[in-house]
Image: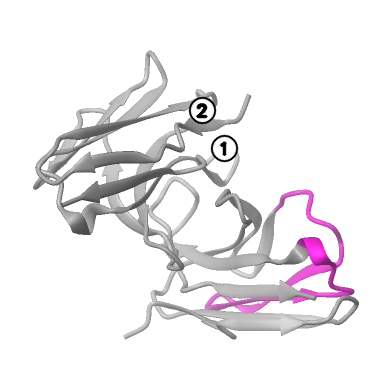
Amino acid sequence: RKEVEQDPGPFNVPEGATVAFNCTYSNSASQSFFWYRQDCRKEPKLLMSVYSSGNEDGRFTAQLNRASQYISLLIRDSKLSDSATYLCGGGSSNTGKLIFGQGTTLQVKP
Amino acid sequence: DTAVSQTPKYLVTQMGNDKSIKCEQNLGHDTMYWYKQDSKKFLKIMFSYNNKELIINETVPNRFSPKSPDKAHLNLHINSLELGDSAVYFCASSQEGAQETQYFGPGTRLLVL
């Protein structure tokens, strides 16, 4: 089993739709969680850090469920510009590693 | 201002050659990383350095040798390149360890022929 798992998709949604991605992790020692966005042929860029209380930034909401060991990302009112690959990652100071999932590809259609 | 920069951006070379990729960060971070992203888009940690000291060596073939002359630079030298080394290599940095946000360079696209 991979340490961080995501459904690779692709998720094809119309503009304006709400879409949710889940990510599961197996290392209970992971302390910090992140959602990164990666555009085609570009580097990953931080979208959101994920806090245990959940956090929201505009149309984006991230949640962490430690008991079930999953992280979610909700995107409301999808825009064409949201089309990208979304990587979730779990970091641990014990291992010194940030482990990424395979990424979930989102394609927002007009 | 470029936070994490890498050179070269593209690298096309023959099997068996030796090549280097350079990385510099101007964020004042203590920790730097090399990642490899293959054709299936998996982003995998290769190495991590903290203040010029090797912290992680993730079972990478010893043809890959990182070097950190100072905490702002982390270079990657690859000997005897193989076809399977073709990938995108990303450098990243964070203030301290992996529990903190990492900032990525633009990537180096390596193609071994």
Q: Going from the N terminus, do you reach mark 1 or mark 2 first?
A: 2
The residue depicted at 13 percent of the width and 38 percent of the height is A17
Q: Which quadrant does the N terminus of chain A fall into?
A: top right
Q: For numbered disc 2, what is the local secondary structure?
A: loop
Quadrant assignment, res B36 = bottom right
The residue depicted at 89 percent of the width and 74 percent of the height is B80
* Residue where numbered disc 1 is placed: A94
**Label for residue A29?**
2
Towards the viewer: A103 or B68 = A103
Q: Are marks 1 and 2 in contact (CB under 8 Å)?
A: yes
- Spot occupied by residue B73 in the image (x, y as percentages of width and height): 58, 79
Question: Could you tell me which chain the residue with mark 1 belongs to?
Answer: A
Number of residues whose C-alpha sits closer than 10 Å to that of mark 1, classed few (under 14), some (14–19) or many (20 or more):
few
Quadrant assignment, res A20 = top left
- Tag count: 2
The amino acid pointed to by label 2 is: Ala
Quadrant assignment, res B34 = bottom right
